[in-house]
Image (tube, rainbow, N blue to C red):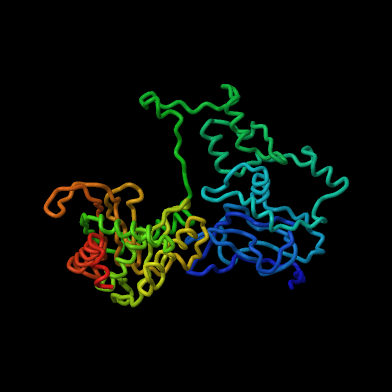
Amino acid sequence: MTTAAPARQVFRLPDLGEGLTEAEVLEWKVAVGDAVEVDQVVVEVETAKAAVEVPVPFAGTVLKLHAGPGTVLGVGEPLIEVGPADVQELAVPEPAAAAQYREEEQAGSGNVLIGYGTGGASGARRRRRGRARPTGKAAGEAAAPAAHPLRAPRVISPLVRKIAREHGVDIAAVAPTGPRGVILRRDVEQAIAAATPSQAAPPQPAPEAAPRETAGLADERIPLRGLRRAVADKLTRSRTEIPDATTWVDVDATGLLAVKDALRRTRPDLGIELLALLARICVSGLRRFPELNSSVDTGRAEIVRHGRINLGFAAQTDRGLVVPVVRDAHLMTTEDLAAELARLTGLARAGKLPPEALTGGTFTLNNYGVFGVDGSAPIINHPEAALLGVGRIIDRPWVHDGAVVPRKITQLSLTFDHRVCDGGAAGGFLRYVADCVEDPSVLIAHS
């Protein structure tokens, strides 16, 4: 049983672990005047690792939201203020950005951030206090547009602003149809359709020497933050610190695909797909060539050969590329690997991966063939020492049993840290993986 907070209490952005020092507010799950309980999720934030739902440790009534969506807060900065249910200060307004976001969310104007919905389902968790609503004359005055003139157009959606900017539409001249003067996407589209030379600002004329098709095109600046910045930092560090080399080989994957199809027919309940089989092969190869399951401790000038195999795998999501980690993959059966890969992939695509699921990897598997490409020289996922890439599998002419016949061919590439091993070990690992792909019985013999 929860009790109301005895006084106004400010909940600050907590330490989200993994050395993270800041987070960006994505979506508030509550509004000023809502009743909240202990451990109720009140906001979703994005760290450099993943999107995280943050619960509040207090019970009571929301008095203030200290940051609107898109605001980056440091650990320890004020996030939300909660007080007892009888506090008579519920008129404390939300920050301008948060208020606009909520109005546009209720108006159904579309996503505020790419990959995130407007959170319509979150309303089911709200319990609005009756006393928070203005009554009598005050309510009438609050509803009158003249009593609260807008200082700026009420639009928070980046998509709406972008559409207006690209078509030269002045937001201030657009007639809003959303609640309390919120400008929606349809308002901008109507303004575009009805635009005349006097209503829409024409683009600046291009220099005479410039091609006509480039007129009116403008640069777009995209903040490098959150997950994108974390990826950029890690890849830059990898290229700066690791002397990497890449080796590759074409292989006949017909036999491996036959095994996958047979398992799908005879044991569909196992859910074993190609990625799980490739993960199984990688684990077996790392046992035979532990040099590649390593990292370099530059501070102590040591190579660290890891006793555990924590297998990372690249997953493309709406928020960008992430690398979830299957921990202790060396202890798992192929069925276990398939189940964990499916679970982590689902969390990644839903943006629900906890930060700890994105760290601690010792080797990465990247199936970039899903993008329709044959090969790549991928960047190592620092601080790991190697990464195996798999290209698309397509029919190609191949010499098999002395005859040129069509076979399912793919390209395997291995990028490795030349500090932890030489080409002999790297080539041995890659050749072992290729042999298992071409003849899965090799895997059974060594498992």
Total count of labels: 0
Q: Quadrant of the C terminus?
A: bottom left
Q: Is residue 126 left or right of residue 14?
A: right
Q: Is residue 161 left or right of residue 403?
A: right
- The residue lying at 47 percent from left, 52 percent from top is 319
Front in this rendered view, residue 43 or 298: 43
**Is 245 rendered above or below residue 183?**
below
Q: Residue furthest top?
A: 197
How far across and how far down the image is residue 361, in percent? 38, 68
Q: Is residue 82 left or right of residue 205?
A: right
Which of the 4 quarters of the picture holds residue 322? bottom left
Residue 321 on image: x %, y %: 42, 55
Q: Is residue 290 visible?
A: no
- Choose top left, top right, bottom left or bottom right for residue 286: bottom left
Confirm whether residue 211 shows in the render. yes
Relative image position of residue 104 (x, y in whole percent)? 65, 44
Residue 73 lies, in percent from the top left, at 57, 60
Given the current orientation, which residue lies at the most extreme left position?
Answer: 402
> What residue sits 41% from the left and 69% below the top?
336
The quarter of the image holding the N terminus is bottom right
Residue appearing at x 26%, y 68% in the figure: 443
Specify the farthest residue to the right: 136
Q: Is 401 in front, or is 387?
A: 401
